[in-house]
Image (cartoon, grey):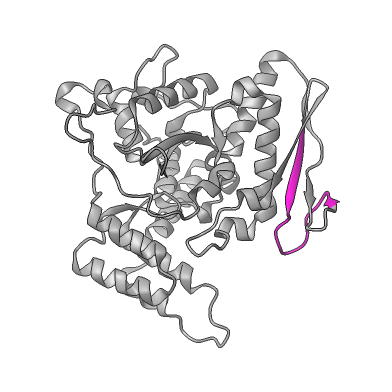
């Protein structure tokens, strides 16, 4: 895989003259989490943006994220990409125009206002500064950590922002600088790092809204009459309610109780949206959520409650299995830099990824992707 965008082939290929999503494309978009709250205008705008930036939504180079908007009274969908998507667009423009392009050293600022070219403290920096050089002009941008940090339901930094705060805020600063340098090419799309704070807890955002009687189905024009509804298989509101309860839990014991109730209701194999907005089986998500709350282990070395959320005999989580299969596929394909290529494509390391992303790359490597 090079730095150039690889467009999806076959039925998923986006044509430059395309004016609406095809039934096959619409089905994949819905499976990725774009539900019926999306409007026709948002879908049309997303298609136009994909065509303009030449980023591929079916390879997760660009995607549409829905967030509850109190003012709008509904879930509003916003296009997003990873920082690598920005870099690809910038490099493509430079290759086509023949201009000069580069960066100055990234700088980080501590709470006292002192700038450094390397960040060594354990705590996160107060800010980061990135300067992009385009054709002799400097485009600088500063991102403040407090304005972009993603937090959990308890107000604490998410795992990625806690462990890699300097890297995350630097990505935000780089996105700001690149958008200054390439305003026409990057207008209308933001990076996942910039939008992470938009997912900070502000009430329930994950309930799906069915199309009401009399409303126009936003997917209808892309699908023949006999196929107007493309269902998201395996999704149910009761299962999502269990997932949402686990997301707000603060102890492993509370998650354990949710697991027992979901098991009794026969919903562990239903698909739900997780805190990271990934699609995952409810049982696998509850196990992972319990383990997340159980870390770090107690100072006295005692056994944490989350270790019994699921019977150990049930084996590894869905993501663990998917990662194992991906690494086997990479070995068979002769891909020696899997971790680097995965993070370049999806904007996060393999160990932070969900099972759907891991399986998607496995299909690409094995040649079974649609």
**Figure check: 255 above or below 203:** below
Residue 20 visible in the displayed image: yes
Taking the view exactly as shown, the residue that stands out farthest to the top is 17
Q: Position of residue 347 (x, y in %)?
A: 56, 43
Residue at the image point whose x is 45% and y is 49% from the top: 326
Residue 284 visible in the displayed image: no
Instruction: Tally the marks.
Output: 0
**Figure check: 315 above or below 365:** below
Question: Which one is nearer the viewer's eye here, 38 or 301?
Answer: 38
Q: Position of residue 279 (x, y in %)?
A: 36, 49
Q: Position of residue 295 (x, y in %)?
A: 52, 72
Residue 140 inside the magenta-drawn segment = no
- The reply, left or right, for residue 136 in relation to residue 32 is right
**Figure check: 258 above or below 346:** below
Which quadrant of the rendered structure holds the C terminus?
Answer: top left
- Choose top left, top right, bottom left or bottom right for residue 194: top right
Taking the view exactly as shown, the residue that stands out farthest to the front is 71
Residue 123 inside the magenta-drawn segment = yes
**Figure check: 108 above or below 188:** below
Residue at the image point whose x is 37% and y is 60% from the top: 285
Which quadrant of the rendered structure holds the N terminus?
Answer: top right
Q: Position of residue 192 (x, y in %)?
A: 54, 42
Question: Which one is nearer the viewer's eye here, 148 or 30?
Answer: 148
- Choose top left, top right, bottom left or bottom right for residue 90: top right
The span shown in magenta is: 115-131
Residue at the image point whose x is 81% and y is 41% from the top: 105
Taking the view exactly as shown, the residue that stands out farthest to the left is 226
């Amino acid at each position: 895989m090079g730095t150039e965008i690889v467009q999806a082939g076959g039925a998923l290929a986006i044509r430059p003259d395309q004016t609406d999503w095809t039934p096959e494309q619409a089905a994949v978009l819905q499976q990725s989490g774009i539900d019926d709250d999306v409007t026709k205008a948002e879908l049309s705008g997303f298609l136009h943006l994909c065509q303009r930036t030449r980023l591929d939504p079916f390879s997760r180079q660009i995607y549409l994220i829905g967030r509850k908007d109190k003012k709008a009274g509904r879930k509003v969908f916003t296009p997003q990409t990873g920082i690598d998507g920005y870099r690809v667009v910038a490099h493509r423009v430079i290759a086509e125009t023949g201009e000069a392009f580069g960066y100055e050293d990234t700088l980080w600022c501590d709470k006292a206002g002192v700038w450094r070219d390397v960040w060594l403290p354990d705590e996160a920096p107060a800010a980061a500064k990135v300067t992009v050089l385009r054709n002799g002009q400097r485009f600088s941008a500063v991102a403040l950590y407090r304005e972009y940090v993603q937090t959990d339901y308890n107000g604490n930094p998410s795992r990625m922002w806690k462990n890699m705060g300097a890297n995350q805020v630097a990505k935000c600063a780089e996105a700001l600088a690149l958008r200054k340098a390439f305003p026409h090419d990057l207008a209308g799309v933001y990076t996942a790092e910039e939008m992470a704070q938009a997912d900070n807890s502000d009430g329930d955002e994950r309930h799906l809204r069915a199309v009401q009687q009399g409303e126009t189905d936003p997917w209808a024009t892309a699908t023949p009459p006999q196929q107007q509804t493309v269902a998201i298989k395996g999704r149910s509101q009761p299962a999502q309610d269990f997932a949402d309860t686990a997301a707000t839990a603060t102890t492993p014991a509370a998650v354990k109780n949710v697991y027992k109730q979901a098991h009794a209701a026969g919903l562990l194999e239903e698909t739900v949206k997780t805190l990271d907005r990934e699609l995952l089986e409810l049982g696998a998500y509850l196990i992972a959520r319990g383990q997340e709350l159980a870390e770090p282990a107690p100072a006295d070395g005692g056994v944490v409650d989350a270790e019994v959320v699921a019977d150990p005999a049930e084996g590894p989580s869905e993501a663990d299995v998917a990662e194992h299969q991906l690494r086997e596929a990479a070995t068979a394909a002769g891909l020696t830099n899997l971790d680097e290529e995965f993070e370049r494509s999806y904007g996060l390391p393999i160990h932070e990824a969900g099972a759907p992303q891991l399986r998607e790359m496995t299909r690409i490597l094995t040649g079974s992707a649609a």
